[in-house]
Amino acid sequence: MRFQNLQRLLKQESGVQLANTMVEEAHSYGLRTFHFKPAEERVPLLKRCTCGQAMKLILRTVIHARKVSITNVPVYTCEQCFRNEVFPGVKEDLGRLIGELGAKPLPRSIPFDEIHEWAGVLKEALDQTQPLQLWTIARKTEERMNDLLDLMLVAASVGDETWKKELKSRLSQLSAQYIT
Ligand SMILES: [Zn+2]
């Protein structure tokens, strides 16, 4: 089963049916057990800042150890008090990346959108509409999931376990934004 109906489902059923479909899909690939996230926790584009203003979800460059620029990291930012908060859905992977770089990295630039599928989808959505729109994000998520599922079929047919593992982890980066 693919995600052809994702846009309609997101619109009409607040993503519950979509989440069901993703759970079935995820199970068929042996991914971990999922539980639905409440609707208000799915892809929130705004978040309340401690100063009371609304924080916007954007992509920005994170500098690590003054040497490494990690570009296109999803963060919430407040235009009032300039507070930034890394999007919870990518925090773990960003932390892992920074851990791998260590305290004394060589100067370089790392596009986070190539490492994390969710950052990749947001980047594509932003290239199309500014500011971010849920509708565009949903469409880009659907396209990317279909691509990954097609690759999964190829990987399965050639019996490449390493590739399958990589694709599974990329699929969970996307589905984790809708289900937990
Ligand atoms: Zn603020």
Image (cartoon, helix red, strand yellow):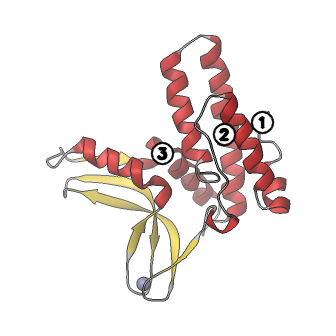
Other-residue count near label 2 (Cα within 10 Å), few / some / many at <14 / 14–19 / ≥20: many
Establish if 111 lies above or below 53.
Answer: above
Name the element at disc 1.
loop
Q: Which mark is residue 2?
A: 1
* Distance between the alpha carbons at the discs numbered 1 and 2: 8 Å
- Residue at the (64%, 28%) spot, across then down: 29
153 or 109: nearer the eye? 153
Can you identify the residue that label 3 sits on? 116
Establish if 63 lies above or below 19.
Answer: below
Can you identify the residue that label 2 sits on? 145
Q: Name the side, left or right, on which 72 lies relative to 150.
A: left
Name the element at disc 3.
loop
Q: Position of residue 143 (x, y in %)?
A: 70, 42
Q: Are marks 2 and 3 in contact (CB under 8 Å)?
A: no
Q: Position of residue 170 (x, y in %)?
A: 54, 37
Q: Are marks 1 and 2 in contact (CB under 8 Å)?
A: yes
**Upstream in sequence: badge 1 or badge 2:** 1
Q: Position of residue 9 (x, y in %)?
A: 82, 54
* Distance between the alpha carbons at the discs numbered 2 and 3: 13 Å
**Upstream in sequence: badge 2 or badge 3:** 3
The three-letter amino acid code for the residue at tag 3 is: His
- Residue 7 in view: no
Q: Is mark 2 within 8 Å of ligand 1?
A: no
Which quadrant of the render holds ligand 1? bottom left
* Distance between the alpha carbons at the discs numbered 1 and 3: 21 Å
Establish if 55 lies above or below 151.
Answer: below
The three-letter amino acid code for the residue at tag 2 is: Met
